Amino acid sequence: MKSLYREQLATMNPYIPGKPIEEVKKEYGIEEIEKLASNENPLGPSPMAIDAIKNEVENIHIYPDAAAIKLRTTIAENCGLEYENVIVGNGGEQILSIVAQTFINDGDEAIMAKTTFGLYGSSVHHMGGVPVKIPLKKYAHDIDNMINSITEKTKLIYICNPNNPTGNITSREDIDRFIKKIPNNIIVIFDEAYYDYAKVNPEYPESLNILKDRPNTIILRTFSKVAGIAGVRIGYALSSKEIVKEMGKVKGVFNVNKLAQVAAIGALGDKEHINKTVELNYKSMALMKEYFESKGFEYINSNSNFIFVNVKRSSQDIFEELMKKGVIIRPGHLWNWNNWIRVSTGTIEQTKKFIECFDEIR
């Protein structure tokens, strides 16, 4: 019998998001929950984004600007580009879907790390492409192996920087060496969802310089993390005008709602909130590093808003035991790193609670 469904769905695994707070409350009968699983902003949303939403909410009977010109122009001005270099989407995951829909034909190959954000592989596979997954080397992107894996079928290469779930960066030196060896007809995607946290590291590359010299480059960023507006779903990509034009053909007409557009514009101007968020991030990170070092737990040095640590026992067990105490983290078995967990940074109080609860069950 002929299948009703696209054949790739039979071998696709759905993305598993962090466990919702309400679900944990109901399952364990706990009222106070600290969610340190989804890399959300512990300070909450940008106040300027909130004000922008309040001012716009009475206009939601009117369709949003399908081209998002004001938002794209504001983003472009911040990046030294033109609005035609910017495309916006319903979160970073929609941008990734648009990339795959724009470029991937049956049998095209896309190179990515084996341990990285799972939606790269699933979006490519969904379009009939072949994800070529390269194992990490010393917990980092294996740049040389990725270069050596290029074939005539290679269409895309993904670099998650900082990488998720490991949190570490690929340095400017490695990226420069990588770019020099990539044929110009291959699209390189830099996923920089954690850009504002990472750019404090002087070794972090400036991908905008690469884009200006190499048009077949896409830079993905988001408002979900440092701006704290994950709930309205808004992300964007920077690329050549030609690529943005082609991606625009498949994005959907009103793919970014009116409230998300104004919230993003507000958040872009809220430098105080961004600076406070990044400052808190590294204070929380320092507390966790100090604790892990004192107990002999290996962790990967992170420039994101989470840390990946080897807890020396089943991550599923740790995940469940912490939930019983009202703390949600991400278990590493989701990436086949069975003894590792990923913990988001939080407020100082949240971080101390995680450390206290983890210490009780370790």
Image (tube, rainbow, N blue to C red):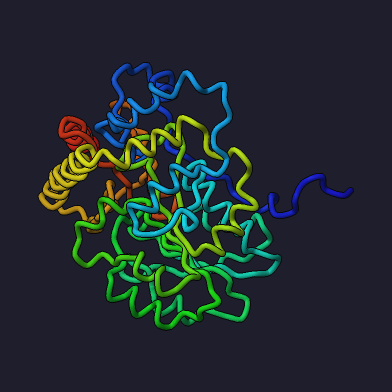
Q: How many marks?
A: 0
- Residue placed at 54% from the left, 46% from the top? 94
Residue 317, visible in the rendered structure: no
Residue 311 location (% of width, % of height): 27, 49
Residue 324, visible in the rendered structure: yes
Say which quadrant the C terminus sits in.
top left
- Residue placed at 61% from the left, 81% from the top? 152
**173 or 347: nearer the viewer:** 173
In this rendering, the answer to whether 193 lies above or below 65 is: below
Residue 175 location (% of width, % of height): 34, 73
Residue 168 location (% of width, % of height): 29, 60
Left/right of residue 6 with respect to residue 86 in the rendered view? right
- Residue placed at 32% from the left, 47% from the top? 341
Left/right of residue 340 with respect to residue 131 in the rendered view? left
- Residue placed at 43% from the left, 78% from the top? 145
Q: Quadrant of residue 106?
A: bottom right
**121 or 19: nearer the viewer:** 121
**53 or 38: nearer the viewer:** 53
